[in-house]
Image (cartoon, helix red, strand yellow):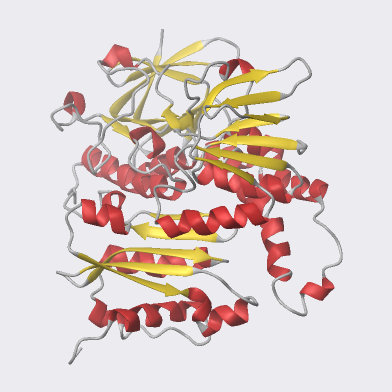
Amino acid sequence: MTTTEYDLIVIGAGAIGENVADRAVQGGLRTALVESELVGGECSYWACMPSKALLRSGAVLRAARSVEGAEEAVTGDIDVSAVLKRRNSFTKDWKDAGQADWVVSAGIDLIRGYARFIGPKQIEVTGADGTTTRYSATHAIAVSTGSAALLPDIPGLAESRPWTSREATSAQSIPPRLSIIGGGVVAVEMATAYATLGSAVTLIARNGILDTMEPFAGEIVGASLSDLGVTLRLHTSPASVDRLSNGDVVVHLDDGSTVVSDELLVATGRTPRTDDLGLETIGLTPGEWLRVDDTLRVVDDNGEPFDGGWLYATGDVNHRALLTHQGKYQARAAGDVIAARAEGRAVFDEPWGAHVATADHRAVPQVTFSDPEVASVGLTAASAEKAGYRTRVVDYEIGNVAGASVHADGYKGTARMVVDEDRRVILGVTFVGPDVGEMLHAATIAVTAEVPLDRLWHAVPAYPTMNEIWLRLLETYGRPVGA
């Protein structure tokens, strides 16, 4: 069998794989991108984009109703069919011709089919017609296959045909009743969307709402979900699940109660898409996350480059930060360093260098598009304390800022700044409130660049904007004499 050779082969043509391939091509490498589903991947068709499209119409409507003058102009309810039509436009009706055209225009060879390793630097791709073709890489292979929804081991769950995030973001009709298992970002966002679109939503969350974030975030979002009509069943767990002959789904909880709905969404975590990649042929374990160093090379149990350093893993599959934007950040570093190593150029792999993903450790930004939004970057107060920092926590009500009062009548929200007292730099920031996602990048810069608090006093926020929260946080912290 003839084997086609490339400098780099990227498995997975989602947003992350596309970026690895693009940077490598720009670095001079002949690169192939292999995809078994839609070019553009999870984010484009079943996650980031369709989920935010489902949420946006309701957020705009609520925002209009929170401002006197605009409120009086709103005379109708949300148009569900129009929301779904708009969502479909974002996914191009789940067709990828446009993104496939971009791949080709970028100088990347697109290979359609399912890839499996057959040995070091070698893969076999099975096409839709069942034919197989072999490819080899002279320098590297990058795995960018992402993650899939995790179904917990609950009796009857798999047999009940539950929704995952894919079904929730691509549904063409709204079920009258929707139950959700989970209390994280996907669960909260879909509870917000479906309650807005007319479902009677019940959220079952064993550990509460947004439990990995600052506690006030879960409290505020939980209260808002209740106001939207979502029934919260917190600190309880499903014991078993049944799908009845009439189509109803019954969730039996460990407190003896039941929840009955038309559909059940499971949003309890993710699992790596590595179970059918042929990893066993190269000495790795199928179904496991791929551990990497900061240049995104797969490493062994001792932290050394695996098998000489030809294998890379970017995005969800390496379990560093399961966020599209963070995966694209990794992809840019990986594509550049793969090209640099292949061409014998200098590698800048010191922390914050051009070829590393240092921000994965302490400066990851995230926005939860609930209502209100939660925007955070860096460490929470609890995680900073656990990491051994000597900290001070500063809170301020965003609604007390002049810009917030203009933004919405009765604006409610909270900001928190976690300060490293020894270095007087910010370790983490959390904002909760309407439209706070657009304020997050300033916080990300402050955390990533470790801007001293004394210098931040000279970053003057425009008035009256919600960014005046920075001045109020600094004033609450207190300015030392002479600073």
Q: Is residue 420 above or below residue 331?
A: below
Give 318 or 217, whichever is nearer the viewer: 217
Q: Is residue 141 left or right of residue 12?
A: left
Q: Is residue 154 above or below residue 361?
A: above
Q: Quadrant of residue 364?
A: bottom left
Q: Is residue 455 above or below residue 79?
A: below
Single out the residue that lies furthest toward the right. Answer: 75
Give 100 or 292, whichever is nearer the viewer: 292
Give 351 or 459, whichever is nearer the viewer: 459
- Where residue 264 sits: x, y (%)? 64, 30
Q: Quadrant of residue 411?
A: bottom right
Q: Is residue 367 visible?
A: no
Single out the residue that lies furthest toward the top. Answer: 1
Q: Residue at x 29, y 42 (%)?
A: 339
Q: Quadrant of the N terminus?
A: top left
Give 212 or 91, whichever is nearer the viewer: 212
- Where residue 435 sits: x, y (%)? 56, 66
Q: Is residue 90 left or right of residue 436?
A: right
Q: Quadrant of the C terminus?
A: bottom left
Q: Is residue 128 visible?
A: yes
- Where residue 296 sits: x, y (%)? 28, 39
- Where residue 458 sits: x, y (%)? 31, 86
Single out the residue that lies furthest toward the bottom. Answer: 482
Q: Residue at x 31, y 47 (%)?
A: 333
Number of numbered markers: 0
